[in-house]
Amino acid sequence: NGEAARAWEGEALFVLIGNCRRFTGARTAQANVEDGLLEVTIVEDAATTNLLGGAALEGVFGRDSACIVRRRTPSLTIESRGDSVEYSLDGEMLETERLRLATEPETLTIPVGDGYQPDPDEGELWPLETGTDR
């Protein structure tokens, strides 16, 4: 939509990044994989009791919780403060202090059937920002 996601800074328990039809916590059945945006879910580092109190993270991110932050952005950088962090990139393991990810629109051409729709639900996938503002 042309709006850049606001930067988030803090301690994260984990970060999920996707660019696919179905993404954990999506509010509609399918995402638009052609919009050039990564869907990002940040689970903030909170006390274990807070996480458990959030009904197992609201049914694995299905609803908002105070410790869940969502963003949609064409690129992002994750930096650790000191030690390297282990990441799983589509099943491949990588360990680094700084990870930069970005979309590259119109880089991949995929044949699709006649019934294909880029945004089949034509609804808001999720607000640009939800969760606790920092």
Image (cartoon, grey):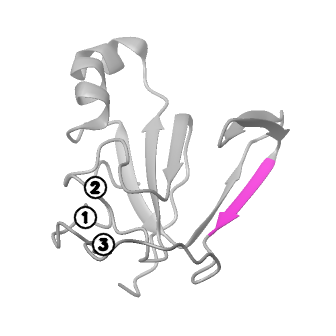
Q: Which residue is mark 3?
A: 116
Q: Write down the region rendered in magenta.
A: 98-102
Helix, strand or loop under label 2:
loop
Q: Disc 3 or disc 2, which is closer to the eye?
A: 3
Graded by Cα atoms within 10 Å as few (under 14), some (14 to 19) or many (20 or more), the crowding at tag 2 reads some
Q: Is residue 112 above or below residue 40?
A: below
Q: Tell me whether circle 1 and circle 2 mark residues in contact (CB < 8 Å).
A: yes
Instruction: Name the side, left or right, on which 82 lies relative to 25.
Output: right
Q: Residues within 10 Å of mark 3 (few under 14, many from 20)?
A: few
Q: Position of residue 113 (x, y in %)?
A: 35, 72
What percent of the width, then of the height, locates residue 36?
49, 76
C-alpha gap between disc 1 and disc 2: 6 Å
Q: Residue at x 82, y 44 (%)?
A: 97
Q: Nearer the viewer, residue 134 or 129?
A: 129
The label number, if any, that marks residue 130 in the structure image = 2
Residue drawn 27% across the image and 57% down it: 30
Image height check: is 107 above or below 130? Answer: below
Q: Amino acid at mark 3?
A: Tyr
Main SS of the magenta segment?
Answer: strand
Sequence-wise, the earlier of marks 1 and 3 is 3
Q: Amino acid at mark 1?
A: Pro
Tell me where residue 35 sits by quadrant. Answer: bottom left
Q: Which residue is mark 1?
A: 127
Q: Is residue 6 magenta?
A: no
Q: Is residue 116 left or right of residue 44?
A: left
Between marks 1 and 2 in the image, the one whose residue lies nearer the viewer: 1
Q: Residues within 10 Å of mark 1 (few under 14, many from 20)?
A: few
Q: Quadrant of the C terminus?
A: bottom left
Check disc 2 and give the amino acid type.
Thr
Q: CA distance from mark 1 to mark 3?
A: 24 Å
